[in-house]
Amino acid sequence: MSDYKSDFLNVLASRGFIHQVSEPAVLDDLARTQRITAYIGFDCTAPSLHVGSLLQIMMLYWLQQTGHRPIALMGGGTTRVGDPSGKDESRKILSDEDIDANLARIKAVFSRFLTFGDDGAIMSNNAEWLNALKYIDFLRDVGRHFSVNRMLSFDSVKLRLDRQQELSFLEFNYMILQAYDFVELSRRHGCVLQMGGSDQWGNIVNGIDLGRRMLNTQLFALTSPLITTSSGAKMGKTAAGAVWLDADMVSPYDYWQYWRNTEDADVARFLKLFTILPLEEVERLAALEAQELNEAKKILATEATALLHGRQEADKAAETARRTFEEGEVAETLPSIEVPRAELAAGLGVLKAFVLAGLVTSTSEARRQIQAGGLRVNDAAVSDERMVLTLADLPAAGVIKLSRGRKRHVLLKPAP
C-alpha cells in the first residue's frame, strides 16, 4: 500500500468514480497532506449486496490503496427505517433477526476488497448508536437542526409526494438518521468524508451541515455517477434477477458470465470501474475492435470475478466457459441443480425444469422464450412447451444440459 500522497481524488477521477465533490480543492489538499477517514453506508435489506453496490465497494478499495482509512458502515439501525431515495414505495419492514442474519452474510464480501485490522479498514454498525437513542433527547439535540421545509425539497421526498405515493413518517426520518451517522463517525473515528451514489447527495450534505452545527467541524461529500449500461439498463439487474455478490446466491461462473456479456460500448468504462488493471492496460483493451473485443470482455469477466471470488474461482469460470463454448463440452463445473430421480422418472415438465434451473423466473417467461427459440435441452432447441424430461433424456454424461441463449447453461442432475 502506498502513502497518502498517492492522490486519492485523482485516482477516483481518472477511473470515472466522481460525480460531485463538496469543496474539492480543500478535500484534495487534506488528502494529500494527511491520512483521512471516509465511509459509505450499506443497508441490510437482503442476505447479500448486488452488483449495484460494487461501485461503492470499489471506492472504499481505492481509498485504502491510496493510504487512507475506509469505514464500511453496516446499516443495522437504518435498515429498520428504510431509505426512500429512488424508491416508489415503502420498504418491507424486516425483523431484527432478519437484519442481523443479512448483516452477517454481507460482512464476508468486504474482506475480499478491504484489509481490516488495528490500523486498517473499519467495519461499523449504526445500530450501536441508533438503537440506543432516546427519542425526546434526539429530537432536542439533533432534530432541532433540521428544517421540514428544506427536507421537503429533497428529491428523495419530493418525487414520492409529487407522484402522490405514500411516504411514511418512518422513512421521512431516514435523512436525519443518516446525517447523525456522519456526526457519530466523526466523533468516534475522525471521519471527514462520506461517499455514496449520486442519489445520496442531499442526505450527505445534511450530514455536513449537522457536523458543522453540532461539532463545529468541516466534513465533505463525494458522490459517484449512477451507473447504467449503454442501453439504459440498471446495473446488477438481469432477466434472471439481481446479480448478487454472495456465491451461494449467484455462482462464480454466473458472475463471470454477467461480466462477459457486457455491451461493447461499456467495456472500457467497466474495466476502469470494476477491475484494478492499470489504466494503460485498460486503454489497450478498449482499443480492440470487432471479435478481438471479446477478449477484452473475457479479461473484464475474469478480473472482476477474481476480486470478489478469488483468482482460482475466476480462472475456473473462464476455463469452464472456454470448454463449453469453444470445445462444446458439458463442463462439470457448470452450475447445476438436482431433481429427485423419482420425479425425473415420472416426467418433469420442461417449463418447470427451466424455472427450477433459474434460467427463467416463471413458466410464462419460459413459454415466451420457447416461442422465440431461446431455450435448448442438450443443445437441441425446445419447440414444444408440453415437452417432458425423463431419465431417457440423460446422455452418457449423466446430466441434462439446459440452456438459455448461447451463454447461460445449467446442468440438471438426478438425485438419489
Image (tube, helix red, strand yellow):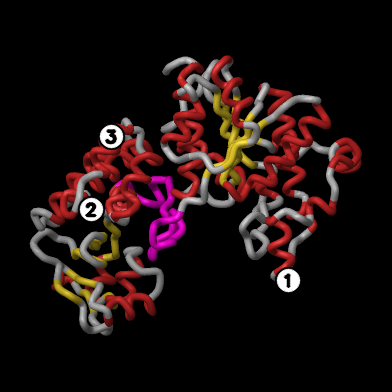
Residue shown at 29%/64% (left/top)? 339
Find disc 3 in the rendering and name its residue: 311
Find disc 1 in the rendering and name its residue: 164
- Marks 2, 3: nearer the viewer: 3
Find disc 2 in the rendering and name its residue: 334
Was residue 60 drawn as part of the magenta stretch in this picture?
A: no
Residue shown at 64%/64% (left/top)? 88
Amino acid type of the residue tagged 1 in the rendering:
Gln
Asked whether the viewer can see residue 326, the reply is yes
Q: Is residue 126 left or right of residue 106?
A: right
Residue 21 found in image quarter: top right
Asked whether the viewer can see residue 134, the reply is no
Amino acid type of the residue tagged 2 in the rendering:
Leu
* Residue 315, percent from left and from top: 22, 39
Secondary structure of the residue carrying tag 1 is loop
Residue shown at 50%/32% (left/top)? 60
Secondary structure of the residue carrying tag 3 is helix
